[in-house]
Image (tube, grey):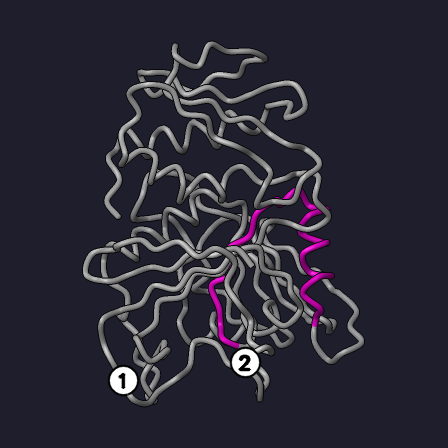
């Protein structure tokens, strides 16, 4: 989905203004010149839109958008897709947590030889960078860092790169790590030499042989992180799904078939349809020549 610069600036403005709002008494107002202000009462016809909040509800019901006159269908669609990453319930016990996957029609994220660039098209890559710019943190597993060496920044869009969180129970070569605040999560006592001041090792005790996703998210919440994008790998995503710790999941379905390769999601075997995980009110978006499915869980 293409987003005009004025609309993207509006989203960044919403993100900044939301940091200081009192959701119990204030609303966010979008003016006709695409500015964002806070208000305790409005005449809706004077504005493009108003966003009100329900402080005691879950993430997916946390806010409501009321539209005034003159709002384009395009802007409504953009707000519908992206506001959920910004307007998260800061009083919840764990952060809003989402996954974005680019995969083939048959569910593959890489070939057998681990070739994956680029399954998603250019618009999808830009969309993923938009999510990075809107959330507080991005999280990956240690194997994903070792193999893919992702930059985890927002070089394709205007905005601030998120805090990085990496789950690694063995030491990582950090020369490829881009600058910025980084948390290294481990259930073991790891030793690094000459760590940069922006890198912090966080040890979490485990009883399962791996770090429980809930414990990890609770630590991130304590550190002031209210929204997290999980970008892989498959084992990390599997644990978030099976632990029921995802708020939202996105599938970018590329118009190609591999017939073999690495699955994006691998869960425990099921035998009956009622054991399947069902998406909650999925929405569909055209992303270039592909389709993206977005759903709360």
* Distance between mark 2 and mark 1 Cα atoms: 25 Å
Quadrant assignment, res 277 = bottom right
Name which residue lies at 47% across and 57% down.
295
296 versus 117 height, above or below: above
Question: Which residues are the magenta region?
Answer: 211-234
Task: Identify which residue, 216 or 175, lies in the foreground.
Answer: 216
Residue 7 in the image: state x and y as whole percent: 30, 32
Magenta-span inclusion, residue 107: no
Q: Residue 3 lies in what quarter of the image?
A: top left
Q: Where is mark 1, residue-wise?
A: 258
Provide the secondary structure element on which disc 2 rests.
helix
Crowdedness near tag 1: few (<14), some (14–19) or many (≥20) residues, C-alpha within 10 Å = some
- Residue 107: which quarter of the image? bottom left
Q: Position of residue 125 (x, y in %)?
A: 30, 57
Q: Please identify, in this view, whether the residue under mark 2 or under mark 1 is nearer the observer.
A: 2
Can you tell which mark lies on residue 273?
Answer: 2
């Amino acid at each position: 989905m293409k987003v005009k610069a004025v609309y993207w600036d509006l989203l960044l403005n919403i993100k900044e203004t939301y940091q200081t709002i009192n959701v119990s008494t204030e609303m966010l107002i979008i003016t006709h010149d695409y500015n964002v202000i806070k208000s305790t009462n409005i005449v809706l016809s004077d504005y493009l839109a108003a966003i009100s909040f329900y402080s005691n509800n879950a993430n997916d019901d946390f806010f409501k958008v009321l539209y005034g006159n003159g709002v384009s269908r395009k802007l409504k669609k953009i707000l519908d897709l992206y506001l959920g990453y910004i307007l998260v319930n800061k009083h919840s016990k764990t952060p809003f947590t989402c996954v974005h996957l680019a995969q083939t029609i048959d569910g593959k994220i890489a070939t057998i030889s681990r070739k994956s660039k680029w399954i998603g098209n250019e618009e999808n890559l830009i969309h993923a960078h938009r999510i990075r710019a809107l959330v507080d943190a991005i999280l990956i597993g240690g194997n994903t860092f070792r193999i893919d060496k992702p930059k985890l920044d927002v070089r394709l869009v205007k905005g601030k790169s998120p805090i990085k969180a990496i789950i690694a129970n063995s030491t990582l070569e950090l020369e490829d790590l881009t600058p910025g605040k980084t948390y290294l999560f481990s259930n073991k006592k790891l030793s690094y030499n000459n760590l940069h001041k922006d890198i912090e090792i966080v040890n979490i005790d485990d009883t399962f042989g791996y770090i429980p996703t809930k414990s990890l998210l609770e630590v991130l919440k304590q550190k002031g992180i209210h929204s997290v994008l999980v970008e892989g790998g498959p084992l990390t995503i599997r644990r978030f799904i099976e632990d029921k710790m995802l708020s939202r999941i996105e599938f970018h379905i590329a118009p190609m078939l591999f017939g073999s390769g690495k699955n994006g999601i691998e869960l425990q075997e099921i035998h009956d349809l009622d054991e399947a995980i069902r998406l909650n009110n999925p929405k569909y978006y055209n992303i270039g020549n592909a389709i993206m499915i977005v759903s709360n869980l």
